């Protein structure tokens, strides 16, 4: 890890590693691991590919090295929070999301929870009401349980180095109302608070503890401001993912166990603990973690975005090949990550 990295450097590296992960995982999204091997060859994914037409990125004419909705929402959030700082509100987040919907070419990728919210906002209906059962106040248990809030949450942790409580409170704003289920709030707080911990420590144990503390804080916030829905418990899944990471020393066996026991889908209870498990197994080496995440398939771009934010913030970009960084920058000229990092660091 490079010595004497400034806070601005850490933010920049986390944002870039997250974007590289998004672009690296986009061509394998929805694929199973055996399909990835048949399509892209043996070994872990190690370069950008043009997304095949049967992926979301391919269906949206994505090019090799381009980000999707995951990193683009993260970058929009980083810009909005950099402008507002501690004055940032839930209304600012909604405005940011609507701006992303109207101006980002990646808006066609948006996930189901975010899409439902935007439809409600554009139609003028109550944005908190989608998913309710009949005329009751109860929402269906599959509403708001995806990983959309977690995939974009890292910039909040970057803005509050080492401050778990503030990070969780502001992360909640970016969860509501689209991701109001506890599992999604816990997951988003785990990623944001893990990133907050990575801003002040390069110790893997400390960063994983930050993820744990974030999840605990997220559940408490969900009890007051969201809902404690029936279904899988995020913290139990995260603990098991870390156990799987500790029990394996071969990549494909590790990923197979992670997929089988934790899952790697768009659900927050699967892909977010999966990302944290990969961070632990890969010892937070950014390039190794990104390759593992891109190779596990299913929601691989979101998983790689989240693990990239954590590992990049923690350990920088030194292990990522220079040609990968150059190709990423060339493929994504719309985002000035140095400017985003400077503004977010000063927020």
Image (cartoon, rainbow, N blue to C red):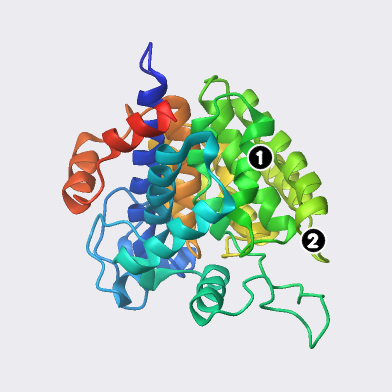
In the picture, measured across the screen, residue 71 lies left or right of residue 213, that is left
Which quadrant would the C terminus be assigned to in this image?
A: top left
| Residue furthest top in the image | 4
- Nearest the eye: 18 or 127: 127
Q: Residue shown at 51%/41% (left/top)?
A: 154
In the picture, measured across the screen, residue 56 lies left or right of residue 218, that is left
Whichever of callouts 2 and 1 sits on the residue coming sooner in the sequence is 1
Residue named by callout 1: 168
Q: Residue 56's quadrant in the figure?
A: bottom left
In the picture, measured across the screen, residue 308 lies left or right of residue 128, that is left
- Nearest the eye: 114 or 279: 114
Residue named by callout 2: 227
Q: Residue shown at 54%/25% (left/top)?
A: 161
Disc on res. 302: none
Residue 209 visible in the shown view? yes
Q: Residue shown at 48%/40% (left/top)?
A: 155
Q: Position of residue 119 (x, y in %)?
A: 51, 78
Residue 253 visible in the shown view? no
């Amino acid at each position: 890890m490079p010595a004497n990295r400034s806070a601005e450097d850490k933010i920049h590296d986390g944002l870039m590693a997250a974007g590289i992960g998004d672009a690296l995982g986009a061509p394998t999204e929805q694929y199973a691991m055996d399909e990835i091997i048949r399509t892209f060859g043996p070994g872990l994914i190690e370069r950008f590919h043009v997304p095949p037409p049967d992926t979301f990125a391919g269906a949206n004419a994505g090019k090799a090295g381009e980000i999707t909705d995951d990193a683009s929402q993260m970058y929009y959030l980083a810009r909005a929070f950099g402008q507002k700082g501690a004055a940032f509100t839930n209304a600012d987040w909604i405005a940011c999301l609507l701006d992303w919907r109207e101006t980002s070419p990646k808006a066609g990728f948006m996930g189901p929870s975010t899409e439902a919210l935007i439809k409600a906002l554009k139609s003028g209906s109550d944005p908190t009401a989608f998913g309710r059962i009949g005329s009751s106040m109860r929402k269906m248990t599959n509403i708001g349980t995806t990983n959309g809030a977690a995939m974009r949450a890292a910039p909040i942790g970057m803005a509050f180095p080492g401050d778990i409580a503030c990070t969780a409170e502001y992360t909640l704003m970016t969860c509501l109302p689209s991701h109001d289920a506890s599992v999604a709030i816990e997951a988003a707080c785990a990623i944001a608070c893990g990133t907050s911990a990575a801003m002040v420590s390069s110790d893997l144990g400390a960063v994983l503890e930050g993820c744990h503390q974030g999840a605990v804080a997220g559940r408490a916030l969900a009890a007051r401001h969201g809902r404690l829905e029936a279904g899988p418990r995020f913290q139990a899944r995260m603990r098991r993912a870390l156990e799987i990471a500790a029990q394996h020393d071969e990549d494909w066996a590790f990923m197979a166990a992670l997929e089988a026991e934790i899952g790697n889908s768009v659900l927050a209870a699967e892909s977010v603990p999966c990302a944290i498990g990969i961070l632990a197994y890969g010892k937070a080496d950014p390039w190794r973690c990104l390759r593992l995440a891109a190779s596990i398939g299913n929601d691989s771009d979101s998983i790689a975005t989240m693990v990239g934010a954590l590992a990049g913030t923690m350990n920088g970009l030194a292990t990522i090949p220079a040609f990968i960084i150059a190709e990423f920058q060339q493929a994504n000229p719309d985002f000035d990550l140095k400017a985003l990092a400077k503004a977010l660091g000063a927020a």
